[in-house]
Amino acid sequence: MSFPTDDANRRTDESGDPTVVHRGFDWSDTDPIEAIVETLTAATGVSATEIDPLQYSVDYDALDRLVRSSTDRRVAVSFPHGDRVVTVTGAGDVYCAES
């Protein structure tokens, strides 16, 4: 399936429904958890305080160590969070897709 882009960070499927939101970060400047929350808020349209706690979906410390300390920018971790799937990469990308 192709994903035509309707703006710089949101992709749509052929019907025009948003399916994936992408944000790019520099892990030396941004905490991965903050990046995930920012991407989830963009994808869902709700405030950060309305997002279910991430601690039930991912181990903060393990994720932080993996994406910040990896020398391989191809490292990627995906996990479900509510009705979304979040993917975080060692290159600084966070994707939030409808599940």
Image: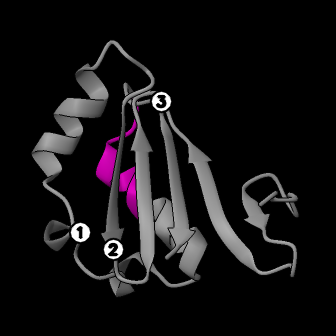
Magenta segment: does it hold 60? no
Point out the stretch of residues depicted in magenta.
29-37
Q: Give the structural element (helix, strand or loop) at label 1.
A: helix
In this view, the residue in front, 95 or 26, is: 95
Q: Earlier in the sequence, mark 3 or mark 1?
A: 3
Disc 1 residue type (three-letter): Leu
Q: How many marks?
A: 3
| Disc 2 target residue | 81
Tell me residue 43's x, y (percent).
Answer: 58, 72
Which residue ends up furthest to the top in the rendered image? Answer: 71
Q: How is the image coloured?
A: one colour
| Disc 3 target residue | 26
Q: Residues within 10 Å of mark 3 (few under 14, many from 20)?
A: some
Residue at 79% of width from left, 69% of height from top?
Answer: 12
In this view, the residue in front, 87 or 68, is: 87
Q: Is residue 44 above or below residue 90?
A: below
Rendered-image quadrant of the N terminus:
bottom right
Q: Give the spatial CA distance, label 1 vs label 2.
A: 7 Å
Magenta segment: does it hold 36? yes
Residues at circles 3 and 1 in contact by the CB criterion of under 8 Å: no
In this view, the residue in front, 45 or 57, is: 57
Disc 3 residue type (three-letter): Asp
Residue at 19% of width from left, 60% of height from top?
Answer: 58
Tell me residue 82's x, y (percent).
Answer: 35, 82
| Disc 1 target residue | 54
Tell me residue 84's x, y (percent).
Answer: 45, 74
Residues at circles 1 and 2 in contact by the CB criterion of under 8 Å: yes
Q: Give the spatial CA distance, label 2 vs label 3.
A: 23 Å
Q: Give the structural element (helix, strand or loop) at label 3.
A: loop
Q: Residues within 10 Å of mark 1 (few under 14, many from 20)?
A: some
Q: Earlier in the sequence, mark 1 or mark 2?
A: 1
Q: Earlier in the sequence, mark 2 or mark 3?
A: 3
